[in-house]
Amino acid sequence: MSDFSVTDAQLSILAQMKISAIKAVDLHDSLGRVLAKNITANRNHPPYDVSAMDGYAVIHADIATTTPDAPISLSIVDDIRAGQMPKITIGKGQAARIMTGAPTPAGIDTVIRVEDTTLNGDEVAILTPPQKGANIRPLGENLKTGHVVLTKGTLITPGVLAILAMVKQKQVPVFGKPTVAILSTGDELEAIDEPIDENKIPNANSHALYAQCKSLGIEATLLGIAKDDPEDLRAKLTEGLRYDVLLASGGVSVGHHDFVRPILDELGITFHFWRVAMRPGHPLAFGTTENGTAVFGLPGNPVASMVCFEEFVGPALRAVMGHKKILLRTVQARLPHNVKGAGNRTLFIRVTLELDDQGYVASLTGAQGSGVLMSMALAEGLMIVPADSGTLQAGDMVTVQLLQGMDCQSESDL
Ligand code: AMP
Ligand code: MG
């Protein structure tokens, strides 16, 4: 099988993903999840015409010709607070004092801001006339009873959650989350709770992948470290196949002790591809079981494992959770220096982003070897150098994917 391009690999994975079943969660737990049903308003909001300002409710015809030099005065016959229903109908030459959010009284058609008036005892002088109808929020401006206000597939942001609260959706129908297991493989690996052995390599991948899942709202299960030993691998991979998604890192290359693929093969996995034309991340196996478990054989190099998560696993998990926007958001940035391409492979370079007066500038986070995890620790984004693009020149515009949590900018940009 020849190498898949990044896009073909993504499409091949997404073709295997099925959206999770619907479940109901508490309103607060719905944040960041995807609405699984249309939501209909069960009330009007506002429930009646309300004032948008603190001021005076008036009949526009009474004050249409008022000026600051010859202000028209009205007598104040009522005082309406938010949450109070007005009892008096306002007549010619009259006004009601009214607070923001209070229902407008019968008879009026306009609200004058308090700043545009002067108070004289129980009379109010109107200094400038607004447009007829000004400063009134009409009944149902925000929500109308019986109308669909949120559609299935909507990402639940704080703004969406506020609407759900307004329509009293204490339980929210959302798409479920997949169960995910993470396994690291390699005789050289040292677990986080083991004492330091200078001859070993600390296990970073399990924790990096755990954190990447968690940033998508998924609490993954860590299956620990498997030795480069067929029996241990068989046992731990079998355990992993009980989950919806299995992430195994290391041992997927063509080395003498890379047993992950042959054992998955033996366990009945159908492989859709096992190499992608990219750097980092060339050895990447993807397969499925008859029961629908998706198995990612991720490269062992820590940067490669994390980049493959961002490009392939993250989009797959988002698709399962019903997200419509499954790829990392991109911005255009300027290169401050030349960057050599990687031949026929797509290159993902770890960068920081700074704003100058012409837009974003993408700077490398130091050495870019696939074992240099610091390059990932410092990164705000992944710059894409498409396959076959030769050397990019300083000043060229490039596409940068924003990493999770990197969507705020510096106070110095104020
Ligand atoms: P492999 O893909 O198994 O050949 O591993 C490639 C490189 O990644 C080797 O240098 C490994 O030591 C390293 N590596 C593999 N798994 C991990 C891990 N879980 N944490 C940190 N480094 C790893
Ligand atoms: Mg290995």
Image (cartoon, helix red, strand yellow):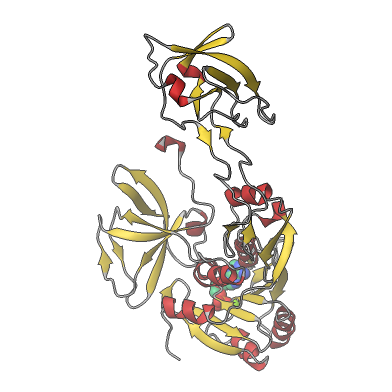
Residue depicted at x 36% and y 61%: 399
The quarter of the picture where residue 195 lies is bottom right
Quadrant placement of the C terminus: top left
Query: If the picture is divided into quarters, which one holds ligand 2?
Result: bottom right
Above or below, 76 relative to 45:
above
Q: Position of residue 373 (x, y in %)?
A: 52, 61
**Is 196 on the left-hand or right-hand side of 56?**
right
Percent of width and height locating residue 57: 54, 24
Residue 398 on image: x %, y %: 32, 60
Residue 291 figure quarter: bottom right
- In the image, residue 189 sits, relative to residue 240, either above or below, namely above
Q: What is the x, y in percent for residue 23?
A: 72, 67
Q: Residue at x 63, y 19 (%)?
A: 78
Between 243 and 175, the residue placed more toward the observer is 175
The residue positioned 51% from the left and 84% from the top of the image is 274
Is 293 placed left or right of 362 in the picture?
Answer: right
Residue 404 can be seen, yes or no: yes
Q: Quadrant of residue 252?
A: bottom right
Nearer-the-camera pick, 377 or 332: 332
Instruction: From the viewer's side, name the closer residue of 49 and 87.
Output: 87
Q: Is residue 186 visible?
A: no
The single residue placed furthest to the front in the displayed view is 92
Image quarter of the N terminus: bottom left
Please say if 357 is above or below 36: above
Say left or right for 117 vs 240.
left
